[in-house]
Structure formats: C-alpha cells, structure tokens
Amino acid sequence: MSDSPMAASPYEVLGVLPTASDEDVRRAYRRLLRETHPDTGGDAARFIAVQVAWERIGSPDARARYDRGRMPDDTAPTWAPQRGERERSRPTARAYGHPGGWRRERYLALLTEWVGRGAAIPDPYDPVLVRRAPREIRHLLADALAEEATARRLAHLGIGYTIWHDVAAGDSEAKIDHLVLGPTGLFAIQSEDYGGPVRVRRGELAGDVLAGERPMHELAVRAKAVARAARVRFTGLLLVLPDDALEDPAVSLGSARGAELVVLQASTLLTALRDGLPGGRAVGGTEIFEVRTRLQAAVRFA
C-alpha cells in the first residue's frame, strides 16, 4: 500500500466502512488474512496489503492517527509543492517549462468546485480532504507528484540533453509531461500513478486501477501532434510508473510511427535515456541541433 493519493485506503483494502467498529475491522482482517495467505493459494501482494492496512488502522491509536491524515510515524504525506523545488530540480541540461504545474492548477480548480465555491479550504493538500475527493481529482494530484518526481530524476542528466516540461499537445486538455532530446534520441515521457499494479496486454496497460484509460494510446496521439508541429521524429515514447506498479523493469509494447513504445519502472528511466533503446534511432552530429531548433520554435507549454 503506497502513500499515493490514488492508493486504496486501509478501509478499502479490508472491505469495511470508515465507520466500522474496531471489532468489525478485526474480523475483516482475520478473514482476509486467511483468504490471501500464499500458503493457501492466496495472492502475495494482497496478503502484504492486508497486513499494511492492519498496521495502519488495527489499533485505536493507529486508527486515530490515520483518520487525522497522519502516517504511522505521525507525519503527514508531503503532497503540497515543496518550496524551492524548481531551483533544486533544475537539471544541468537546458530545461524549459514547469513540471507538474498544469496538473496542480487543474487539481486546485476541480477541488474548489467539488468542495463548493466560496467554501474555505485551509489546506488543499490535507490528506483527510484528499482521500475523500473523487478519483479524477486524486488522480490529478497523484500524476502531478509523479511528474515532479520524474523531473527530479531528469535533473541528473548531463549537459548533452535538453528538456521541455508540460508541453501542449493538441487541444487544451492534452499535454506531454516531458520531452527529452539527447545523443540517444528524442523521447516523449508521460508520468503516471494509478495507485496500484498494472500489467501489459495487447500493446496497452491493463488492470482494475485504470478505470478504462488507455495511457499508451493517448501518449502516441499526443506525440504525433508534437511531431507534426515540430517536424521531428521520436525515438521512444516512455510511460513511467512507480516501481511497485510494474512487475518488470521495462516492457516494450511495440512501436508507433517508428517510435518504440515502452512502459518502465521509474528507477530505470535514466538508464533508458542514457543507454538508449535497443534498436532505437539515435540523434547525433548536426542533427541534434536541427531537432532542438525545430522544437524550440514549435513547443508551446500547457
């Protein structure tokens, strides 16, 4: 059970309401412990999630902390923007745009509508408030956090790379989180967090947590819009997920218009960018300057 705004709550994991009695929570935990135990044919991931859920709400003190929006160590999740983050995450490569900015603005706007215009929101990142919000709103915040985490990783790329964050790709609701240009090619990168594990099936992501979304298809459509506007070709379209959301470090989903489609764990991103994709089209010599010039003229920010 991650600390993502999209993660299932301990109550959801145990299948009880937040108003359930302590005894009801205990009975649900014991039942699920038997059902999910690997020795009896249960799922190991669910077994671990049930244990973590119990740790968070299994005792009156732990449950009271969770209901106040606190973590087991009595700290709160750090979902608010971090002061000075843009300065700390500025890469040694040239970088443009504001990672996570569009999603955070959209999150705050939808949160205000959901709470009610005119109603005071002392802390829009209060965990108790966030966990009550509809899925669409929580997903925006989770993706903003994922996008900012990717930007911090990209900060470790060297001076041979250029990065554009929050790039508009078509209509007002479409964007690509990051464009990265370097010696190994041109990459469109999308950061996602669905709050649970996913799998690959027929060239797309699948899983209960997706709610019908087709993230790789959407990334391909957006990359096509940018490629046409800038007259460039992508080497790879990368979908970055939290490490615990994907079983394998990286999985190829085929190609689209010559660009390799890859979903990968966040910790493997820099390796993929520095080493390049197997068989991927590198960008070298004067071409890298030509591609950068075209992108600089064509890129618009969300």
Image (tube, grey):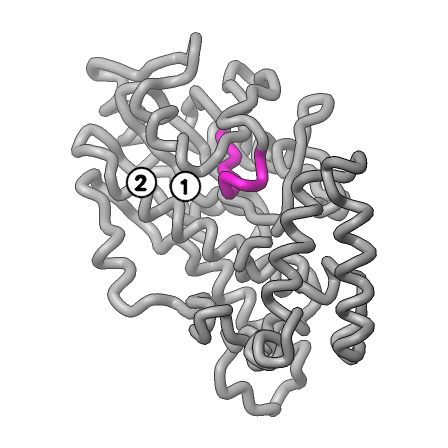
Residue 216 percent location from the top left of the image = 61, 33
* 169 in magenta: no
Q: Is residue 31 left or right of residue 155?
A: right
Residue 12: x and y, percent?
74, 62
Residue at image coords 67%, 32%: 199
The amino acid beneath tag 1 is: His
Tell me the residue at 65%/52% (across/down).
49
Q: Where is residue 169 in the image (x, y as percent from the top left)?
A: 52, 42
Is 42 located above or below residue 126 in the figure? above
- Write down the residue under mark 1: 178
- Magenta residues? 238-246
Horizontally, residue 82 falls left or right of residue 128, namely left
- Of residues 208 and 169, which is closer to you in this image? 208
Q: Is residue 129 visible?
A: no
Residue type of the residue flagged with mark 2: Leu
Secondary element under disc 1, as helix, strand or loop, is: strand
User: What percent of the width, then of the height, locates residue 185?
Assistant: 35, 21
The answer to whether residue 92 is left or right of residue 46 is: left
Nearest to the observer: residue 107 or residue 82: 82
Magenta stretch encompasses residue 243: yes
Disc 2 target residue: 154
Name the mark nearer the viewer: 2 or 1: 2
Residue at the spot 75% in from the left edge and 75% down from the top edge: 18
